[in-house]
């Protein structure tokens, strides 16, 4: 088992990426020391372990009675790292209350890539209303309106893009969407090289869509 208090809090690309995953799919327990990361994607659970250098077993759990809805769980105890997350603005039961996350600007896009891998989506389609019109969108979702507003403000300042916010009908999830030219600016920022940590299937989906318009990631 990983000794308590040994998870690095020194800023790096990997740490910023891991924090993005925690904000998306993580949870801080009420005991003041345990962090739990839950994902439907096994590869993402493995990556989470690797970036934080954790020596723990990846567990499994099912949602309700459905055997098809299986989740992978990484749980570890580290009081120092727990308090570090608290200092960034990440708290227990954060889903609907989280706002600003104190990420250094130098590592913001690595954080955003983690956030995208956890709670983001990318989709594309041919718009039949206009000939040869190929649409694509970069989306981040959250149950917290304050978080979505903060993220939108950060991207407006850093990248000069506005996007738009929508809310699920009869739901509680907010979505920050960027279309075409704006989404392309974000994509090139969060994938500065082929070596950065990321969820491979999401990157591949983006690469295939961009190839249709003659764009490439590095």
Image (tube, rainbow, N blue to C red):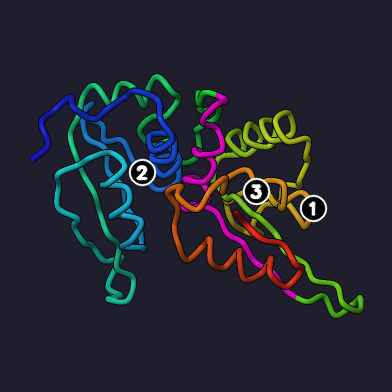
Identify the element where label 2 is drawn: strand
Dot 3: element: helix
| Residue 188: numbered disc | 3
Which residues fall within the magenta stretch?
105-125
Please say whether residue 110 is one of the residues in the magenta stretch: yes
Which of discs 2 and 1 lies nearer the camera? The answer is 1
Alpha-carbon span between mark 1 and mark 3 = 11 Å
**Dominant secondary structure, magenta:** helix
x then y, percent, for residue 22: 39, 41
| Front of the two marks 1 and 3 | 3
Residue 87 painted magenta: no
195 in relation to 161, above or below: below
Rendered location of residue 84, percent (x, y): 33, 22
Give the label on residue 181, or none.
Answer: 1
Quarter in which the C terminus is drawn: bottom right
Among the 4 quarters of the image, the one containing residue 171: bottom right
Residue under numbered circle 2: 26
Mark 2 or mark 1, earlier in chain = 2
Q: Compared to 165, does 64 lie above or below?
A: below
**Is 45 situated left or right of 11 in this image?**
left
Q: Secondary structure at mark 1?
A: helix
Tell me whether circle 3 and circle 2 mark residues in contact (CB < 8 Å): no
From this view, report whether residue 64 is shown above or below residue 97: below
Question: Which residue is at 62% across, 59% downward?
Answer: 170
Residue 87 versus residue 44: which sits nearer the camera?
44
Point out the image quarter for the N terminus.
top left
- The image quarter containing residue 82 is top left
């Amino acid at each position: 088992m990983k000794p308590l208090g040994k998870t690095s809090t020194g800023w790096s690309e990997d740490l910023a990426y891991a924090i993005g995953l925690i904000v998306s799919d993580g949870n801080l327990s009420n005991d003041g020391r345990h962090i739990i990361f839950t994902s439907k994607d096994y590869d993402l659970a493995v990556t989470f372990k690797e970036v934080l250098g954790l020596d723990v077993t990846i567990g499994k759990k099912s949602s309700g009675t459905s055997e098809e809805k299986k989740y992978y769980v990484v749980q570890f105890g580290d009081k120092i790292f727990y308090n570090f997350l608290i200092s960034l603005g990440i708290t227990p039961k954060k889903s609907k209350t989280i706002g600003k996350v104190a990420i250094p600007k130098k590592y913001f896009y690595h954080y955003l890539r983690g956030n995208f891998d956890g709670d983001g989506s990318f989709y594309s389609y041919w718009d039949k209303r206009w000939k040869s019109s190929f649409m694509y969108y970069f989306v981040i979702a959250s149950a917290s309106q304050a978080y979505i507003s903060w993220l939108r403000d950060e991207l407006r300042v850093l990248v000069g893009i506005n996007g738009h916010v929508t809310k699920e009908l009869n739901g509680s999830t907010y979505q920050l969407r960027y279309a075409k030219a704006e989404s392309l600016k974000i994509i090139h920022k969060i994938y500065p090289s082929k070596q950065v940590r990321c969820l491979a299937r999401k990157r591949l989906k983006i690469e295939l869509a961009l190839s249709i318009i003659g764009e490439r990631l590095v």
